[in-house]
Image (spheres, rainbow, N blue to C red):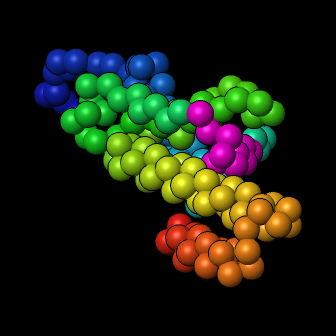
Amino acid sequence: MKGDEVPKWHGKMTWTSVSIWLWGLLAFFMARSNHYFISNKRVYAKFGLISKKTFDIPIDNIQGVIVKQGFKGRILNHGDIIFSTSGQYAGSTVFAGVSDPYKIKGIVDNIIEINKKRSAVIQKIQSLEGEYELDKISEEQYQNLKSKYEKELQKYE
């Protein structure tokens, strides 16, 4: 202090401030170390700063897609997406803190729907081949129906 200075307040950085700073720093590194990927065949998530944990889930194994969004998330348009699975991948995988979670949910729901339709067409082709092998339909019918199903299948590629 200089000659005529009068102290009015004295303090130190609080643990709260330190913890907010540390949480901010941790959040920055977590955001940089978590990676999410969705393709037409799988959902992939990689987590971890020091140790790594990865999830690679085939789209066909996803039973449900849930969006979790609090009040702040609704205002800022971010939230968590939870993929529930069964079988070998039983449990759930979370894409935490993603932007526009309902758009991502829509993308995944659309991929699941397309894959179901694609699988149905593939099943029709397999059934058709079985009928042809058993001589239940003629070669002409087989070729016509197979061509029709293959065109339908191309819509879902």
Rendered residue at 57%/50% (across/down): 116
Confirm whether the magenta stretch covers residue 148.
Answer: no
Tell me the magenta residue range.
54-63
Position of 47 with respect to 7 (left or right) is: right
As drawn, which residue projects farthest toward the right? 133
- Is residue 132 at least partly visible in the picture? yes
* Residue ID at (69%, 49%): 58
Image quadrant in which the C terminus is located: bottom right
Whether residue 61 is in magenta: the answer is yes
Q: Which x, y percent locates residue 64?
A: 53, 33
Dividing the image into 4 quarters, which one contains the N terminus? top left
Q: Main secondary structure of the magenta part?
A: strand
Asked if residue 87 lies left or right of residue 21, the reply is right
Q: Quadrant of residue 115?
A: bottom right
Task: Left or right? Give the position of 125 relative to 20.
Answer: right
Q: Is residue 120 above or below residue 54?
A: below
Number of numbered discs: 0
| Residue 57: x %, y % from top left | 70, 45
Task: Give x and y (percent) for residue 106.
Answer: 39, 48
Above-or-below relation of 18 to 112: above
Asked whether 48 or 117 is in front, the reply is 117
Q: Where residue 54 appears, x then y in whole percent? A: 74, 45
Q: Residue at x 22, y 18 (%)?
A: 9
Q: Is residue 109 left or right of residue 56?
A: left
- Viewer-nearest residue: 150 or 111: 150
Nearest the camera: 7 or 29? 29
Q: Residue 90's image quarter?
A: top right
Judge whether residue 94 can be spotted in this image: no
Question: Residue drawn at (35%, 29%), measured in percent from left and top?
Answer: 69
Comparing 45 with 20, the one in front is: 45
